[in-house]
Image (spheres, rainbow, N blue to C red):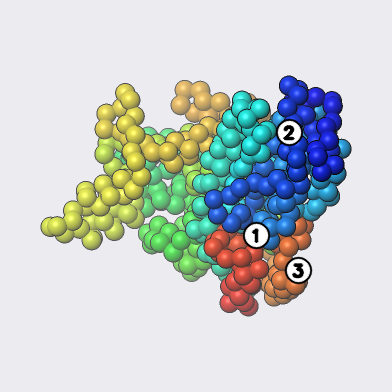
């Protein structure tokens, strides 16, 4: 508790709280005139540290460009004390205001703040409150900083791919609907197969030295899309290939695909439809899966479909999670370097190698193109490894895989990740009866209804509203209404 239990009265008659040292938390002359000063017009989500009498927060309720106010106090006791003041009572009843204390600020941000809806996030302090509680103010600043670091990467990916994801999902759903009499879901693997060690093959540089081990070993080979070309080039036909990439360029991974192979091609609903069609036209087995996209979840809620995790968004983790869902107890990773080893970013034989060799010339060599790829972001030398580098993104991917292994009780023993608990094998054998026209009509009408009243709380309470959050992130520089209208116009293209 940072306040005393005494309440003072300002000269204008307003009740104000006192800090424990007896100093007033608000102006003793005219607290109703108190306001937070901004360098520019306030907009988006505002975190106000220091509630006190609430006069300064009440002023913010009149700002039209503020979409959400999160008012935070030092602790729960202080928050309860503040709630007795009339201004605090008023702001607590407002729909766009959330009251919390420091201990649950991070949880509040994670569950209540959606960048695509509320736009910018700004932290401001009540000046007198900050002066009296510098340590608490610093802790709140750190909580907000850490939260922004956590969501910034995810939001930037949504802002980059949001439009493409929606397109791909709708086209892939139409593909499933048009071929509803065919089985796109691999049957449950036989027990003798899942007793094997699943080789999760990524396309890191060290794969160059692992090819012979994969050839000699009795593995069930699950390849990432980037490593697929390398395996085929080395006469290894994988049992499964995983693809979660939305980009058109990803279709180049599959140009080496033969007809009617033993390989099952696993595509996320967000995957590029050109890749799906190319593999399908080669008469190969296809399995669709879904990741975390809310539109995918909504569309497939009545469909038996594989749900996989990809951690921070890597196909390597998606491949591992698919293997886990199939019932594999033992996983061995190849080429999962999460680093640039031996001065190059990928193993031999990927589509990038062919692309770079074909475009190299006397002025720009293949090595220079690889160097440009590696130096997109700042490199960090890996101590103890010759000519090996990493980046913040790669470190995040590596940590994400470690977190996935821990969460799913996989422990590393002699180079193999072994599950410490029995994994329940899921049956992915199911034919789709999905009706695209019916779903599409519901989707369009759902967005149309939201356009009649595009308020944040209305959108977040609607399944259709949640389903368009990624594409709203893509239209981040527009108002909420304009973003929703643009998402609606984009959806109309896939009727």
User: How far, Cα to Cα, is label 2 from label 1?
Assistant: 27 Å
Foreground residue, 108 or 74? 74
User: How far, Cα to Cα, is label 2 from label 3?
Assistant: 39 Å
Mark before the other along the chain sequence, 2 or 1: 2
The quadrant of the image that shows the C terminus is bottom right
Foreground label between 2 and 1: 2
Mark before the other along the chain sequence, 2 or 3: 2
Residue located farthest toward the left when viewing the structure as drawn: 362
- Which quadrant holds residue 193? top right
Provide the residue designation for mark 2: 25
Q: Are marks 2 and 1 in contact (CB under 8 Å)?
A: no
Residue 468 seen in the figure: yes
Q: Is residue 204 above or below residue 93?
A: above
Foreground label between 3 and 1: 1
* Crowd tier of the residue under label 1, counting other residues whose Cα lies within 10 Å: few below 14, some 14–19, many 20 or above: some
* Crowd tier of the residue under label 2, counting other residues whose Cα lies within 10 Å: few below 14, some 14–19, many 20 or above: many
Residue 44: where, in percent of width, then height?
A: 63, 54
SS under mark 3 = loop
Mark before the other along the chain sequence, 3 or 1: 1
Q: Residue at x 65, y 46 (%)?
A: 36
Residue 194: where, in percent of width, then height?
A: 58, 39
Q: Residue at x 60, y 43 (%)?
A: 123
Residue 257 seen in the figure: no
Residue 35: where, in percent of width, then height?
A: 68, 47
Foreground label between 2 and 3: 2
Provide the residue designation for mark 3: 453
Q: Residue at x 49, y 58 (%)?
A: 160
């Amino acid at each position: 508790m940072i306040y005393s239990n005494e309440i003072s009265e300002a000269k204008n008659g307003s009740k104000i709280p006192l800090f424990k040292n007896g100093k007033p938390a608000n102006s003793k002359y005219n607290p109703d005139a108190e306001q937070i000063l901004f360098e520019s017009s306030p907009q988006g989500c505002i975190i106000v540290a220091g509630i006190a009498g609430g006069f300064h927060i009440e002023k913010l309720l009149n700002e039209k460009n503020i979409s959400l106010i999160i008012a935070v106090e030092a602790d729960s006791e202080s928050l309860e004390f503040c709630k007795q003041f009339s201004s605090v009572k008023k702001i607590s009843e407002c729909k766009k205001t959330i009251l919390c204390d420091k201990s649950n600020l991070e949880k509040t941000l994670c569950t209540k703040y959606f960048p695509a809806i509320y736009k910018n996030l700004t932290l401001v302090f009540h000046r007198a409150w900050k002066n009296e509680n510098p340590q608490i103010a610093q802790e709140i600043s750190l909580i907000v900083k850490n939260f922004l670091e956590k969501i910034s990467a995810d939001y930037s990916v949504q802002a980059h791919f949001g439009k493409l994801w929606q397109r791909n999902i709708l086209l892939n759903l139409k593909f499933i609907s048009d071929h509803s009499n065919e089985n796109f879901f691999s049957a449950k693997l036989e027990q003798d197969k899942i007793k094997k060690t699943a080789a999760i093959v990524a396309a890191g540089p060290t794969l160059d030295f692992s090819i012979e081990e994969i050839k000699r070993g009795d593995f069930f080979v699950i390849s990432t899309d980037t490593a697929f070309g390398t395996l085929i080039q080395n006469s290894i036909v994988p049992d499964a290939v995983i693809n979660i990439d939305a980009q058109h360029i990803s279709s180049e991974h599959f140009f080496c695909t033969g007809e009617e192979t033993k390989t099952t091609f696993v595509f996320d609903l967000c995957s590029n439809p050109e890749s799906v069609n190319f593999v399908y036209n080669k008469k190969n087995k296809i399995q669709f899966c879904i990741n975390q996209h809310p539109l995918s979840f909504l569309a497939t809620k009545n469909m038996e479909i594989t749900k996989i995790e990809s951690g921070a968004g890597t196909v390597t983790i998606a491949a591992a999670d698919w293997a886990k869902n199939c019932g594999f107890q033992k996983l061995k990773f190849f080429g999962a370097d999460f680093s640039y080893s031996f001065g190059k970013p990928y193993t031999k034989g990927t589509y990038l190698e062919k692309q770079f060799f074909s475009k190299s010339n006397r002025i720009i060599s293949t090595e220079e193109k690889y160097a440009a790829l590696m130096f997109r972001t700042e490199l960090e030398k890996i101590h103890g490894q010759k000519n090996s580098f990493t980046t913040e993104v790669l470190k995040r991917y590596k940590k994400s895989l470690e977190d996935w292994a821990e969460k799913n009780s996989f422990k590393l023993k002699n180079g193999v990740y072994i599950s410490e608990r029995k994994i329940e094998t899921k049956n992915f054998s199911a034919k789709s009866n999905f009706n695209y026209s019916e779903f599409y009509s519901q989707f369009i009408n759902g967005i149309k209804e939201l356009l009649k009243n595009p308020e944040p709380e209305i959108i977040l309470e609607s399944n259709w509203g949640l389903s368009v959050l990624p594409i709203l992130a893509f239209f981040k520089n527009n108002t909420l209404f304009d973003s929703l209208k643009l998402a609606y116009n984009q959806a109309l293209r896939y009727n």
